Amino acid sequence: MKNNILFRFWYYFRTGWATYFAFILAAINTLTVTYFLAVDNYPVLNIIFPSFEIYILAAVSIGIPLLILIGYAHFKRTQAFRSEIEVFLESNPYQARSMVNVEMNLQLNLKVIELLLKISKNYNVDEKDLGKIRKLQDEISKIVIERTLENKMDVTYAKNSIKKT
């Protein structure tokens, strides 16, 4: 950790700047510039917004709900966020690895629970059930053996999982 402390500080600085400081400054700057360069110079707009304070109230009361709707659309109604996640997974193989491990664990746990339920009800586990387990074991083994952080198998698997949902 001592070797990368400067990079950690750099990351924290960029996050603080981009997420908080730049956001607040950009909002203040946009409101100030648009009012004094546009509204103040046009009599029609000046009648609608006679003071800077009224302009801010109008911009905030319209802008905040509008931006919430745009943010909602970004996450829930467009392909934009899904594309961001794909780029994130491509650039962060550790996150892709974690996602793939979780997915494989879920699949395996569901099969084990299915078998446990059959056994608990005194049903025989037949060759069909064992075949499904062997197939799942082979798929998981193949991925675990062949994947590396460099060959991007985890990223491909994760992208295919994302596309299925």
Image (spheres, rainbow, N blue to C red):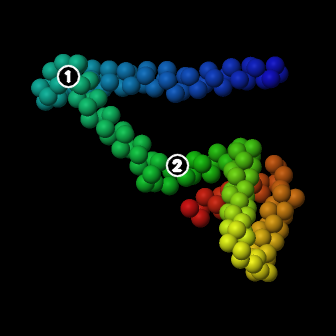
Q: Is 23 displayed left or right of 84 in the figure?
A: left
Choose the circle earlier in sequence order: 1 or 2: 1
Q: Is residue 71 above or below residue 31?
A: below
The three-letter code of the residue at mark 2 reads: Phe
Please state the horizontal and vertical placement of residue 112, each as a whole percent of the image. Answer: 73, 64
How packed mark 1 is, by other alpha carbons closer than 10 Å (few <14, some 14-19, many 20 or more), is few
How packed mark 2 is, by other alpha carbons closer than 10 Å (few <14, some 14-19, many 20 or more), is some
Quarter-wise, where is residue 156 in the image?
bottom right
Q: Nearer the viewer, mark 1 or mark 2?
A: 2
Q: Is residue 111 above or below residue 41?
A: below
Q: Is 4 displayed left or right of 34 in the figure?
A: right
Please state the horizontal and vertical placement of residue 128, each as a whole percent of the image. Answer: 75, 80
As drawn, the label of residue 81 is 2
Q: Residue at x 29, y 29 (%)?
A: 60
Give whichever of 45, 31 is nearer the camera: 31
Please state the horizontal and vertical placement of residue 123, each as a whole percent of the image. Answer: 71, 77
Quarter-wise, where is residue 12 in the image?
top right
Q: Residue furthest right?
A: 145
Query: In 3D space, how far apart are the residues under numbered discs 1 and 2 (Cα atoms)?
Result: 35 Å
The three-letter code of the residue at mark 1 reads: Ile
As drawn, the label of residue 54 is 1
Please state the horizontal and vertical placement of residue 72, each as a whole percent of the image. Answer: 41, 46
Mark 2 element type: helix
Q: Residue at x 27, y 20 (%)?
A: 36
Give whichever of 81, 107 is nearer the camera: 107
